[in-house]
Amino acid sequence: RKDVPPRMGRYTFGEKIEYWAVIWGTVIMILTGFMLWNPIIVTRFLPGQFVPAAKAAHGGEALLAVLSIVTWHVYNVHIKHFNRSMFTGYLAPHIMEEEHQLELSPQTAQIAPATSVQGRSRRRAIYLPIAAVLLITLFIGVYFFFTYEQTAITTVPRQPVEIYVPVQSTPNP
């Protein structure tokens, strides 16, 4: 039915979009920030049109982030109904019933059992090597970006030009 909103669990539709927008925005800001930081390196590997495009994307993403925080987050947390959970750690029952109905249902309200030590060690054995490879790759990439920097474009060699030549006085006739 159209008049009944969908039942949501721990995270609502809007919260999920907001979290993914933060991740996407962070990736865009980092990539375009590196491109704007050293455009000479970027133009060695990519066409020159990428630098102005990065500038537009960087500025647009910054504006979008500020506007979304002002409109979306401030409205939902402070105006729609003041959310005190950041101070108390608890959400008001009427807000919980309105926004997180599935979280309150008897099937999901039970506390999930703690993961076993074996399960945690198995996940850690998968996660740590992948995280280590990604971290090393990231550090190598940032080091390459820092040390490969060329700060100026090579131009035509300077030509000596006389700027001040005193005028020699001529004798009066």
Image (cartoon, helix red, strand yellow):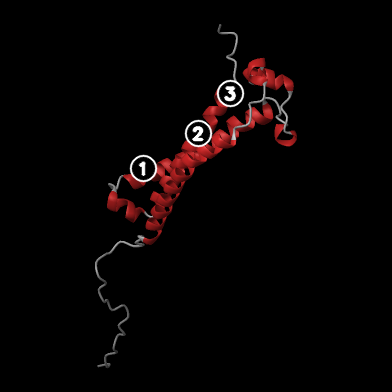
Residue 76 image-quadrant placement: top right
Numbered disc 1: secondary structure: helix
At a point 55% along the width and 23% down the height, the residue shown is: 13
- The first of marks 1 and 2 along the sequence is 2
Real-space Cα distance between discs 1 and 2? 20 Å
Residue neighbourhood size for the residue with mark 2, other residues' Cα within 10 Å, grouped as few (<14), some (14–19), many (≥20): some
Real-space Cα distance between discs 3 and 2? 14 Å
| Left or right, residue 146 beside residue 157 | right
As shown in the figure, which amino acid type bears the numbered disc 3?
Answer: Thr
In the current view of this chain or complex, which residue is farthest to the right? 88
Question: Which residue corresponds to mark 1?
Answer: 53
Q: Nearer the viewer, residue 51 or 94?
A: 94
Numbered disc 3: secondary structure: loop
User: Residue 138: percent from the left, percent from the top?
Assistant: 42, 50
Q: How many marks?
A: 3
Q: Nearer the viewer, residue 142 or 156?
A: 142
At a point 64% along the width and 17% down the height, the residue shown is: 101
At a point 61% along the width and 25% down the height, the residue shown is: 10
**From the viewer's perspective, is residue 133 above or below residue 6?**
below
Residue 120 image-quadrant placement: top right
Residue neighbourhood size for the residue with mark 1, other residues' Cα within 10 Å, grouped as few (<14), some (14–19), many (≥20): some
Real-space Cα distance between discs 1 and 3? 34 Å
Q: Nearer the viewer, mark 3 or mark 2?
A: 3
At a point 41% along the width and 41% down the height, the residue shown is: 57
Q: Nearer the viewer, residue 141 or 15?
A: 141
Q: Quadrant of the C terminus?
A: bottom left
Q: Which mark is residue 21?
A: 2
As shown in the figure, which amino acid type bears the numbered disc 1?
Answer: Ala
